[in-house]
Amino acid sequence: MRIESFPPMGTSEISVSGRYLLGDSPAEIRHLVEQAHIYANEAAELFDLIEIDVGSAAIDVGCGVLGVLHVLAERVGVGGACAWS
């Protein structure tokens, strides 16, 4: 079985020029990093509730740029898998 995402993973936020459509200025990048930091603890709590553990496989659908992928990757570890869409 072949599984594809629509739109193809990662293309919804990137323009033809390769720039993030919602802004890629230093201020916007700082904002995204701060936002990811702010939601990290809440994301970890939610991952506890749905029992994502070391070795799990998970996907963050609609995460946008950064999101909580860093928390998810730490959670599943090297034996697990995480992806984004």
Image (spheres, helix red, strand yellow):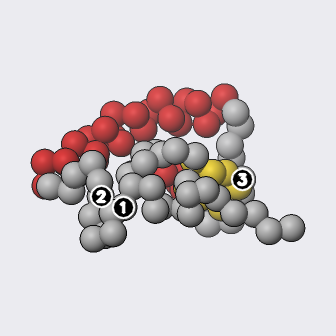
**Looking at the picture, which amino acid does disc 3 mark?**
Ser
Closer mark to the observer between disc 3 and disc 1: 1
Q: What is the tally of numbered marks visible in this picture? A: 3
Closer mark to the observer between disc 2 and disc 3: 2
Judged from the image, the secondary structure of the residue bearing numbered disc 2 is loop
**Looking at the picture, which amino acid does disc 1 mark?**
Ile
Q: Is 18 situated above or below 52? A: below
Q: CA distance from mark 3 to mark 1?
A: 29 Å
The quadrant of the picture occupied by the C terminus is bottom right
* Res 68 label: none
Q: Tell me where residue 79 appears, x and y as whole percent.
A: 68, 65
Q: Is residue 35 visible?
A: yes
First in residue order: circle 2 vs circle 1: 1
Q: Tell me where residue 70 appears, x and y as whole percent.
A: 45, 53
Crowding around mark 1 (Cα neighbors within 10 Å: few <14, some 14 to 19, many 20+) is some
**Looking at the picture, which amino acid does disc 2 mark?**
Tyr
Q: Tell me where residue 40 appears, x and y as whole percent.
A: 42, 38
Q: Which residue is mark 1?
A: 14
Q: Is 50 situated above or below 21? A: above
Q: CA distance from mark 2 to mark 3?
A: 30 Å
Q: Which residue is mark 2?
A: 20
Judged from the image, the secondary structure of the residue bearing numbered disc 1 is loop
Q: Which residue is mark 3?
A: 56
Task: State yes or no: discs 2 and 1 in contact (Cβ < 8 Å).
Answer: yes
In the image, what residue occupies the spot 27% across and 48% down?
22
Q: Nearer the viewer, residue 25 or 45?
A: 25
In the image, what residue occupies the spot 22% across and 52% down?
23
Q: Nearer the viewer, residue 59 or 7?
A: 7
